[in-house]
Amino acid sequence: MSKNILIIAEQRCDRVQNVTFELIGIAKELAKVNGAEVEVLLMGHNIAGQVSDVVGYGADRVILVDDPCLASYLTEPYAQAATEVIRERTPGVVLVGASSIGRDLAPRVAARLNTGLTADCTKLAMNEDGTLEMTRPAFGGNLFATIVCPDHRPQMSTVRPGVMKKCDFDASRSAEVVHKEIAFAPQKIRLVEEVKVCSVVDSIEDAKILVACGRGVGNPTSIEQAKNLANELGGTYCSSRALVDACVIESCRQVGQTGKTVRPECYVAFGISGAVQHLAGMEDSDYIIAVNKDENASIFNVSDLGIVSDANKVLPLLREEIEKLSRA
Amino acid sequence: MEIIVCLKQVPNTTEIKIDPVTNTLKRDGVESIINPDDKTGLEVALQLKEQFGARVTVLSMGPQQAEKALGEALAMGADHAILLTDRAFAGADTLATSKTIAAAIKGMPYDLIIAGRQAIDGDTAQVGPEIAEHLDLPQISYACEVGYNADTKVFTVKRQFEDGYQILEVEGPCLLTVLSTACKPRYMRVKGLVDLDNKEVQILRRSDLVIEDEVLGLKGSPTKVKQTFNKQYNTNKQKLVLDPAEAAKLIAATLKDKHLI
Amino acid sequence: MNSQLKYELFEKMVKEFTENEVKPLAHELDETERFPAETVAKMAEIGLLGINVPKQYGGAGGDMRMYIKAVEIISKACATTGVVLSAHTSLCVTPILEYGTEEQKQKYVPKLASGEWLGAFGLTEPNAGTDAKNQQSIAVDMGDHYVLNGTKIFITNGGKANVYVIFAMTDKSLGLKGITAFIVEATTPGFSIGKKELKMGIRGSSTTELIFENMIIPKSQVLGRVGEGYKIAMKTLDGGRIGIAAQALGIAEGALEETVKYVKERKQFGMPIAKQQNTQFVLADLATKVEAAKMLVYAAADAKQAKDPTLSVKAAMAKLYASETAMEVTNKAVQLHGGYGYTREYPVERMMRDAKITEIYEGTSEVQRMVIAGALLR
């Protein structure tokens, strides 16, 4: 068994996803402790062009499985390929992005390898003996647990996107590329249709400033004002679960336990009460401004500047104030 | 058609609050509910039952009190309820849990197994896929629409991803994990509630399962909890009661300070 | 399974239903005086319109405790929706079940219990309120059928119901013993809906006049025996009063809950008004009365379930006490809300208007006192 760290890369729409680079970033940190190597398993079809990306972000070795069976993500062929590669490479640690695909694939692979899997980690630490400490939120983010997997290998973890830092891209890096052939078993599931929305317009994870709306911003006018405000500030808008459930805001803009984790430079929350599920997704923002009518709202527990006031009335006035200051 | 729905009783985590003084979880008086994704899974099963005819069995692993969740499922329209409960199962992580549930299902007839995507107390989304692996079944996770063709016995499932969806076809037996957005679970029926008087939850214990001791409970769990801790909150914060005009001024000034405007 | 679980889960279900389907409409129904037809359809789907109807007649086979609890919980959020359920169940389904022939029960109860049909009850007339014997609706025996003429007023579910239990004089010379009950379908020629009342409270509930013009009523529609109508009406109202008592209890609980929430939020003199001893003492008294009302209502429901001969008195006490408690609680709830409580922005204003009717319909508080005193001084 090796002590290496293997990352199962995620590629969608012909692009390696950010979470993979974030995993390489944390893996490089972990590897420093025990001198492990960072290997990246890249699966798909016609994906050789993506190798340079994972190398540039720090992979020491790339294992490439390129096969028509992997053209679209399907659980079984991906699980079969991943399991065979892991059995061959015998890494000490396997990291997977906690995206939809990662959270579908990882448990299937872990069960097949008869090992433990810690879901949705937000912190990882390596001990010198090669045991990994995996910290994750539970109870909707109310509680954190540090999990270890002492007697089974590999130690597997899915890691929440947006939490770990990727390394700077270095185009001059090089790494060994291992091609692996897999004899795929016949498939029981047929793909009839696949629709992808590959556009990545103003993703909330990448925004420097986020204007967030919650239940307290009830009417379409206020929501429109919040969107405009975000636009003027050069950021984008997002929301708590309430408005997504009410179909007022798109689900890809939901922040929180069941949505996305964000940490912008500034998070401005209007009318968000601050259920722990929401706080879990935004409390690491650099600076948090919250406006809510209820002075007991939990959002004030995490905000740097809390203002007890009616968000619906503050929003239109704020626009004027900002215009004044930006002209000044 | 035989459908097994896996469901878990969970504390309603949306009700859990942090005690601002002790910084600990206030769990007292937090009600136990059927995990929302699982309840949607049951609704999907009940709709298939209404359209195509099926026997719906709900299965839960947990303490004796989980009978209440199963009673609710029966009152919604499930035909049969099974509770896996034994001290030997306690402390199980997802791998041990999935092996225990798979061992219970092994002896049962089924065409379809439905689980919720994930439980709100653990948020792991692992037990469903791991059960499928132990039973060597194809799995489709994140199902948001489930269709069935009674002639060809093929399920057609729409599977939701962050950036799109897939339409997949599969023959039973298979396992689906369902998103809570798939449909709105029905209310318990008054008649179903009255009928609880004449229904029993079937209890399965360690001795009823064919499985090795080594894979059960805490002992059979590869992952161990080393430590738990509560969230620490920022204490260097300001909270002001302001009228909207003052509020707007202050926010604008703060943004200017931070060079955001 | 343990039968306690049945009650526990039933309450949970009705609470969820009320929270999601009833509460969000309460304000709008009151403002627009709109009958909640969509909620009635949803109640039907779950089985709430046949809670205590035996399974053989298409009901859920539940008991009075479940039915009364449902009226209470629903009324806590919306007294309009509560009375639709109560009038249907207590005043229409129950008398048909208790006095109907097997044929009548087979014909009407399954459709009523499933909610395909809604039920109502017609006793009150312009000149026959508390003095019910002064019935001027007349059913004339024509050999193989009756011809019914007359009007009824203040009929809950009027115009929305498909089936009415109607009382009319068949022999004026016999006084009270000349009143007979009939099952009347809304589609019968000669049946029409008159004036729709504009009311102080329960404004979404449909309260109308019924007009009967030369209606031909087959003899198979006689409910109970000829001349037994007054007895049927009084026994039916004994049961109905428990439903209204539950409605009143619900209103009181709703107002108390709203007020407890409000006094913790509302600040005067730099602190929540909940810190004022006046607030605390008023709330303590109200909560105690609500609890006492609850005991009386549940005891009456159990008496009805057990066919207890003292039901009349128990039902009268429950209705008297619960309705007067509802009036007192809502009145003081508005007071504790101050000026805001008088605005239609807060639900206690509606609750106070809704509470008043519970002291009036299905026997005024004075009638309840007559019933109680009559039994004492017999």
Image: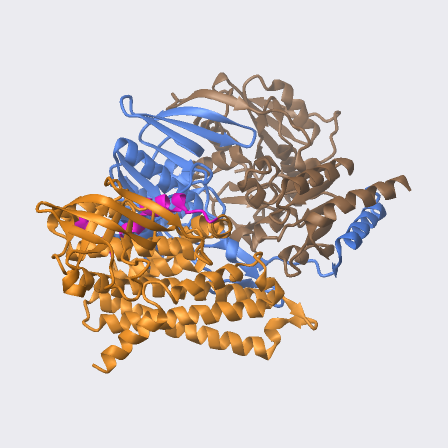
Chain colours: A brown, B blue, C orange
- Taking depth in this image into account, of C3 and C80 the one nearest to the observer is C80
| Residue B70 located within the stretch drawn in magenta | no
In the figure, is residue A246 to the left or right of C203?
right
| Residue C49 located within the stretch drawn in magenta | yes
Which percent across, then down, holds residue A13? 59, 23
In the figure, is residue C272 to the left or right of A245?
right
- Taking depth in this image into account, of C48 and A42 the one nearest to the observer is C48
Kindly identify the residue that appears in the image at 61 percent across and 77 percent down. C276
Farthest front residue in view: C173
Which percent across, then down, holds residue C323? 39, 68
Magenta part of the chain: C33-62
Compared with C315, B102 (above or below) is above
In the figure, is residue C351 to the left or right of C131?
right
Which percent across, then down, holds residue A63? 57, 26
Compared with A133, C309 (above or below) is below
Q: Is residue B79 at least partly visible in the picture?
A: yes
Kindly identify the residue that appears in the image at 38 percent across and 65 percent down. C360
- Taking depth in this image into account, of A17 and C263 the one nearest to the observer is C263
